[in-house]
Amino acid sequence: MPKKKYRILGIDTSLRSSGIGVIEVNGSNLSLIFCGRIYNRSTETHSVCLKNIYNDLTDCIKKYNPGFVAVEGTFFSKNAKTAMILGQARGAAISACAQFDIPIAEHSPRTIKQAVTGNGSSQKDQVAKMVMRLLGINEQPQEDAADALAIAICHYHQLSLPESLRSPNI
Amino acid sequence: MPKKKYRILGIDTSLRSSGIGVIEVNGSNLSLIFCGRIYNRSTETHSVCLKNIYNDLTDCIKKYNPGFVAVEGTFFSKNAKTAMILGQARGAAISACAQFDIPIAEHSPRTIKQAVTGNGSSQKDQVAKMVMRLLGINEQPQEDAADALAIAICHYHQLSLPESLRSPNI
């Protein structure tokens, strides 16, 4: 187990709208530090979107100083073109986080839903509602930001498992 | 047409061995400035590989100051898992280049072969031999480095076309 008080950055990566969420863990208490999204207009070139993802995450890490990063595992069922575009967004995000030598893990969509709601097949809205309850917040976060917070909460659960049972770092 | 003397960085991206090649264009004369590869051992995590790609390309651009960057267009026929991994490597590479606000273009494998050898279906070794001839070098570069030089040479050809006929920037 990591030290008593630490922060986790969850990232729900996509080219046009990546969710980011930072939670603080203090013993068994979870609280919201920041959530938002990296929005790229549809008129921006891919290279500008990737630069923005890299730079915004760099700023976020400098500002909130997380001890762990977690991203959503990839959907291998998607087609190759979609996978390539999502992969590029992930590459920009992961290379930004890797500059800080913070451990980076990935969790499958099912593991994330299971950790937050107890059900690996739950709907987006149920996940968002549970995120609000677990973090004690009253206003529902924007959809991608809520997903990012769910990823961070999932990682908190993972850290309470024996190391051999956790998702490996990437 | 760009100014008379300028440099082009070609990148043949992959997670474990990305080729990089810088050529200088002086009128219609092409010369080799640098070629090599970013090698990541199979024991490295993906996040370390992506960090290395980002950092090595950043160093390369600072050192050689290219005015243009070109990458190989993606193979959409590959399966989704392969596309995702290649996409991540591209995302790290493109976000590094985008920090310098250099125009970044991509060219299909067929366009690259066509530009270098006159035949869009030519073999790797024919491409490498033609790269050597066009750049006036005696020693055959490592395979990924030769591919990167071919991409840079292809971009030189593209720049001689009217803007409406060039591959768009990404």
Image: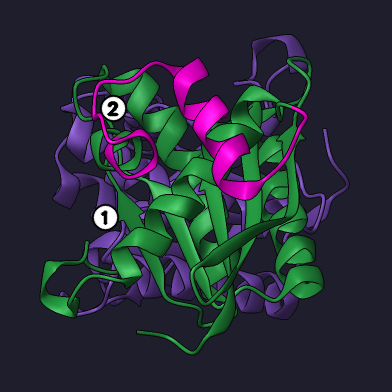
Chain colours: A purple, B green
Q: Contact, CB < 8 Å: mark 2 with mark 1?
A: no
- Disc ID at residue A128: 1
Q: Earlier in the sequence, mark 2 or mark 1?
A: 2
Whether residue B87 is situated above or below residue A96 in the rendered picture = above
Whether residue A25 is situated above or below residue A118 in the rendered picture = below
Give the amino acid type for the residue marked by disc 2 in the picture. Phe
Magenta segment range?
Answer: B114-139
- Main SS, magenta region, reads helix
Is A53 positioned to the left or the right of A157 in the image? left
Q: Residue A120 in the image: state x and y as whole percent.
A: 27, 23
Is B32 positioned to the left or the right of B76 in the image? right
Which of these two is toward me, B162 or B133? B133
Label 2 neighbour load within 10 Å: few <14, some 14-19, many 20+ = some
Q: Residue B74 in the image: state x and y as whole percent.
A: 30, 38
- Disc ID at residue A82: none
Which of these two is toward me, B57 or A1? B57
Q: State the residue position of label 2.
A: A75
Question: For the residues marked 2 and 1, what is the alpha-carbon distance in whole angstroms?
Answer: 20 Å
